[in-house]
Each structure stands twice: as C-alpha cells, then as structure tokens.
Amino acid sequence: MSYTDTLLASGERILRRSRQHWFVMAWNSRWAIVAVIAAVALLILRLAISGSSLVLDILGYVTLLLFVIGLVVVAWGWIRYQNEEFVITSRRIIHVSGVVNKKASDSSLEMINDAVLTESMIGRMFGFGDLDVLTASENGDERLRMLRDAKAFKKAMIEAKHELAIELERPTSPPIRGSKAPATGGSAPAPTGGERPASAVPGWGSAGPASAPPPPPAPATGSPTPSTAAAPGQGSQPAEMSGGEVTDALDRLGDLRDRGVVTEEEFEAKKRELLDRL
C-alpha cells in the first residue's frame, strides 16, 4: 500500500495515478550523471596509461569518488521520483512527494475552475506535458510540470469533477409518499369506520342514486283492494280475561290516571271495556 492510499477518506476511491516523465528525474540528477560519465572516462584513461605515479594514484581516487557520489545521487533522485505521484480520486487531486518526510497537498474537485494543458513538440513526441490546474482554494493553482500523459490525466480530472457534481445534486432523502389511488380495474377500497358502500344504501347503486323503486304490482281482477278488504281480526270478539287479570289491568290504568297520563273519560271507557271481557 502506497502512502497515498492511507490518505483516502471513507468512500473515496482512486481513479487515476500518474507521475512526472523520467526526463524530470534525469534533469534533477544531471550533475550526478555527468559525474558518473566523467568517472567512467577517467577510468578508461587510467587503464590506458601504464605505470604508477602520484598523479595517477590521485586520478584513480578522484575517479572512484566521482563514480560513488554520482551513483548515490542518481539513486537518491530515482527514489524521490518513485515517491512522487499525482492522484485523481473521486473527490480531489492529491500531490504526494518526499521520501522520509512526506508532503501531501490536495485540491478539491469542486474548487477546480479550469485546467490549462501545454504540450511542446518534444512533449508530444515523448508523451508529457504541463498542466496548470486553476482552483478557487486558498492554496492557489496547482502546477504539474512535465506530467506523463498529461492529456489523459486532464480528461480523467474533468470526468471525475462531472461525476462528483452529479452525486452532489442527487437527492439524499426519499420522496414523500402520497395517498395512492386504486388501480384501474382493481377492487374498490374497503370502507372504514361506520361508512357503508354505496351499493349497501337503499336506492343507491355503483353509479350514484338509483331511480325510485317501482310501484307494487296492481292487484289481480276480483281481488279485494286495501280499502275494501277487511282488516285482520275485524268483527272478532275480544278474548275473555280472568278476574285477576282485569283487576291488575284496572290497577295499572288507575295509576296512569293518577299520574295524568290518561283522562277520566279514557279511564271510564277502558274500565267498561275490561269489565265486558269478564
């Protein structure tokens, strides 16, 4: 795991990694490379001259010193080159540098306003370019010099910024649910509380109030009409009552008269009726 992976926040993912072109490492170590080349040339010269003298001995020590120092500086430059990288994540651009003492600077994708890409003829030939990332943060602009495959890096940065903008605009809370209307052709919702369906109300159907109920069928010819038919029990004699029943009825009737429920005339008429039933 690289040092950049330890800087990622929860849910943050790396989209692209890149480094500067190896020309940068070679340029930073140019004097060390010159020293190594000089040491190799002196070594060849020393082997070509036979004999032993103080000058040749000093020349041998200088050759060895130049070679060792040159190799150490070149190796250190290579280690620094490998530990410096530019990373695009789903939220920001991170620039990490340093071998022992690490330095990490980042620019949020939200704060990026523009990116200026510059590619020279040599850069197009060897695949590198300069990318100036213009931001609105306090750290100012991010300058990526001699970035390897700078064109692809810029495209990845723009796509990551676009995806982040879509993610921030996406609603985080679910929509409020409304009352759902019954589906067409489905069963009607069951009545709640004391409500009754329209079909259960007399004179009402599924489409609203129905017409008045049809009149009863006319009586058949020769059958007695309600006006001429005799009422049930008409002409029959009232049932006889025992003396105890008449006495109890007269007591209740007298109580009603005393409370003013019935008048004196009604009491006498009912009394005669009860006495006739003995």
Image: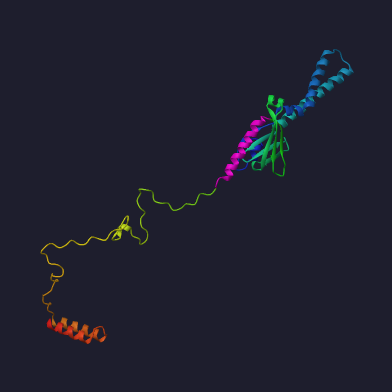
| Picture coordinates of residue 29, whole percent (x, y) | 77, 28
Whether residue 154 is in magenta: the answer is yes
Q: Is residue 162 magenta?
A: yes
Q: Within the image, what quadrant is residue 33 found in?
A: top right
The magenta stretch spans which residues?
A: 148-171
Q: Quadrant of the N terminus?
A: top right
Residue 105 seen anywhere in this rendered image of the structure: no
Up-down: is 98 above or below 48? below
Residue 198 as seen in the image, left or right of residue 255 = right
Quadrant, the C terminus: bottom left
The tally of labels here is 0
In this orientation, which residue lies closer to the viewer: 204 or 178?
204
What residue is drawn where x is 19% and y is 84%?
A: 250
Q: Position of residue 256 (x, y in %)?
A: 24, 83
Rendering quarter of residue 222: bottom left
Q: Main secondary structure of the magenta part?
A: helix
For residue 52, side relative to residue 236 (left or right): right
Q: Where is residue 78 drawn, in percent x and y?
A: 72, 29
